[in-house]
């Protein structure tokens, strides 16, 4: 429940790698042998369609940085295929915290092109231009304790529970939407933050330190190794995010990401983005 990833194939013949499908970034990168930390990697010399580009690549995440160089090669996602797809082959990953223990090999960004340094199209741009998608959209279903699903070109009706709520994107850098309110139980609003980012690449909820601390104090949470915990028997008030005039509420069960004895770890943390905003990560998207 702390991360969702899936298989892509790069090169000719296709080399299978696991990537995080990340709405919080815009680039696709895969590791070379040098950057793989012993995990599966992209061997460009084994691909008959590989083309090296001279453009350097670097990206920073909350967990660290990676660097490499851009290239072009065939990319396959399920039955979708792009020839001459532009992505980065990364040879320096030692800046990523705990990289060797992560269960995925690379990252496929689904954010807006403005955040990309790529000399080519983003994966989603290329898929739209290819005409292979029924609609220029993608849909996530993040399951709990079982595999989820990502559909390019639409959504899976089997995982649609009701009517969609449509929101304008405030800023084409991330999937940024207006945040009307953050409510804890019957308290009308515990947040003055005006925006939120919907981010499949962030495991937890994350918000401004002052607001997160206030919410955690209200529910009586303690800290354990930098994480917020409560007694598993505690019944917490619902935490509600209001988007587009509609309430999206999270129960105690929704917020808990791990049990440690009789204590439950909550999937919420503080973050400093340089300006006030909440990140609605997998804990939110899963509900």
Image (spheres, grey):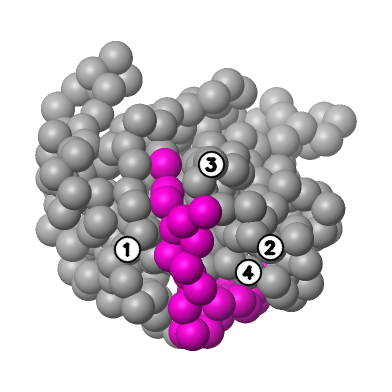
- Does residue 156 appear left or right of residue 230 in this picture? left
Cβ atoms under marks 4 and 2 closer than 8 Å: yes
In the rendered view, tell whether residue 78 sits above or below residue 181: above
What separation in Å lies between label 4 and label 3 (alpha carbons)? 20 Å
State which tag comes first along the sequence, 4 or 3. Answer: 3
Q: Earlier in the sequence, mark 4 or mark 1?
A: 4
Res. 71 visible in picture: yes
Can you give x and y, in whole percent of width and height, for residue 263 in the image?
Answer: 79, 36
- Marks 2 and 1 sit apart, C-alpha to C-alpha, by 20 Å
Q: Are marks 4 and 1 in contact (CB under 8 Å)?
A: no
* Residue position for label 4: 90
| CA gap, disc 4 and disc 2 | 6 Å
Q: Residue at x 34, y 42 (%)?
A: 81
Which tag is nearer the camera, tag 3 or tag 1? 3
Nearer-N-terminus badge (4/2): 2
- Which mark identifies residue 122? 1
Give 195 or 81, whichever is nearer the viewer.
81
The spot of residue 241 in percent (x, y) is: 33, 48
The answer to if 108 sits in the magenta stretch is no
Q: Which residues are magenta?
A: 48-76
The tag earlier along the polypeptide, 2 or 1, is 2
In the image, residue 146 sits, relative to residue 37, either above or below, namely above
């Amino acid at each position: 429940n702390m991360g969702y990833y899936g298989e892509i194939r790069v090169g000719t013949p296709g080399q299978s790698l696991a990537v995080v499908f990340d709405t919080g970034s815009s680039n696709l990168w895969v590791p070379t042998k040098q950057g793989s930390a012993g995990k599966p990697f992209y061997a460009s010399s084994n691909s008959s369609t590989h083309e090296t580009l001279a453009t350097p690549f670097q990206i920073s995440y909350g967990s660290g940085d990676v660097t490499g160089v851009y290239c072009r090669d065939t990319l396959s996602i399920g039955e979708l295929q792009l020839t001459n797809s532009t992505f980065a082959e990364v040879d320096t990953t030692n800046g990523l915290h705990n990289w060797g223990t992560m269960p995925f090999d690379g990252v496929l960004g689904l954010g807006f092109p403005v955040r990309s340094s790529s000399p080519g199209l983003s994966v989603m741009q290329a898929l739209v231009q290819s005409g292979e998608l029924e609609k220029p959209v993608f849909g996530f279903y993040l399951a709990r304790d079982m595999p989820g699903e990502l559909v390019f070109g639409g959504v899976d009706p089997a995982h649609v529970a009701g009517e969609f709520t449509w929101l304008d994107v405030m800023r084409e850098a991330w999937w940024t939407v207006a945040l009307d309110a953050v409510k804890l139980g019957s308290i009308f609003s515990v947040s003055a933050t005006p925006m939120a980012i919907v981010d499949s690449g962030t495991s937890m909820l994350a918000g401004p330190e002052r607001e997160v601390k206030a919410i955690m104090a209200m529910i009586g949470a303690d800290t354990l190794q930098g994480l917020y915990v409560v007694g598993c028997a505690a019944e917490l008030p619902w935490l509600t995010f209001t988007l587009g005039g509609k309430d999206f509420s999270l129960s105690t069960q929704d917020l808990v990401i791990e049990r440690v004895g009789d204590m439950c770890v909550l999937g919420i943390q503080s973050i400093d983005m340089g300006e006030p905003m909440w990140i609605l990560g997998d804990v939110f998207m899963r509900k």
